Amino acid sequence: MEEKLNLVQEWDKTFPKSEKVNHRKVTFHNRYGITLAADLYAPKNAEGKLAAIAVCGPFGAVKEQASGLYAQTMAERGFLTIAFDPSYTGESGGSPRYVASPDINTEDFQAAVDFLSVQDNVDPDKIGIIGICGWGGMALNAAAIDTRIKATVSSTMYDMTRVNANGYFDAEDSEEARHAKKVALNAQRIEDYKNGSYALAGGVVDPVPEDAPFFVKDYYDYYKTARGYHPRSLNSNGGWNVTGCMSFMNQPILKYSNEIRSAVLIIHGEKAHSCYFSRDAFANMMNGNPCPDNKELLIIPDAVHTDLYDQVDIIPFDKITAFFRKYLG
């Protein structure tokens, strides 16, 4: 049922390998038949059935970047974890490459829960997820539909449906602006079909213009330097397909977030350009929610967007650990 993937076996992460955990590559499949690649991290000398966490993101990144750092760190703290590449990206399967889908990418999280639920050393009643950047929104969408997920952390979240439909800071939130984008994207579809290949949109801007907004420079500092560059990362290289995120424009993924009964911790940097996504998502999630007492918004003073990718002195790992220990046991 699973596609055979060519997985790199040597350590090629953007963070050092921990001596406190065991690491191996694994694969699993989603219900669309796509085989996903993941790094599995398990605490050394652990016994019995463990609580488990699946991690993904940022949007356009790979498991060798921020998600792997989160997964390894949480394994050091006693959880069995996986960091996975989403469908069509990194070492995971799926063709064509470099395309995203609010449906399939939510399913990727659910498939990770499938995989974790059947591991001999995992307690299937103690599974949580962490979504970073655009995968923070996907994690909330997964939590809204998957009752097996007992606790969710969203870190430095993007609502990818909102930003695709409305532009940054909702500056393009009009029928006219959306229509213009749709015309351009549908024209690109014809060009791609004629060419038999999908044009790439380009990754993080390089070189960065002097007058670029801070968040563009922030992304460059992570994805394009030794700090976070990875050869398989979309953002570090050629980016998504031009039409890769088209379907996000009219599929709002957070519609039913106020029906999430399980525990949710939303974390964001105070100075992040993207902080409005988390503040609004939290407010919407709390509006009429039947279980409001296990929901929390945590704003990190002075932190910017990519600080929560890899700055271990800023990422609130103690808080995240306490949260999962409380709700996963």
Image (cartoon, helix red, strand yellow):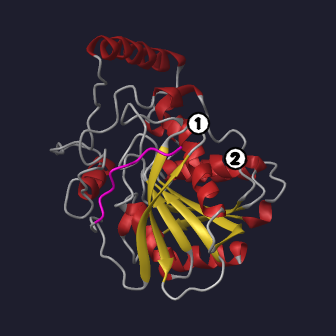
- Residues in magenta? 1-9
| Residue 284 - label | 2
> Residue 229 — which label?
none
Please tell me whether residue 141 belongs to the stretch shown in magenta: no
* Image: 75 above or below 269: below
Q: Classify mark 2: residues with Cα within 10 Å, few (<14), some (14-19) or many (20+).
A: some
Query: How many C-alpha atoms fall within 10 Å of the one at disc 1: few (<14), some, or many (≥20)?
Result: some
Q: Is residue 5 magenta?
A: yes
Using the numbered discs, state the Cα–Cα distance from disc 2 to disc 1 in whole angstroms. 20 Å
Residue type at tag 2: Asn
245 horizontally vs 259: left or right: left
The residue pinned by badge 1 equals 103
Q: Amino acid at mark 1?
A: Asp
Q: Position of residue 47 (x, y in %)?
A: 61, 86
Decide: is 24 above or below 260. Answer: below
When asked about the image quadrant of residue 15, the answer is bottom left
Label 1: which secondary element: helix
Q: Nearer the viewer, residue 46 or 304?
A: 46
Q: Position of residue 309 (x, y in %)?
A: 39, 63
Q: Quadrant of the N terminus?
A: top right
**Residue 254 placed where, x, y %?**
65, 42
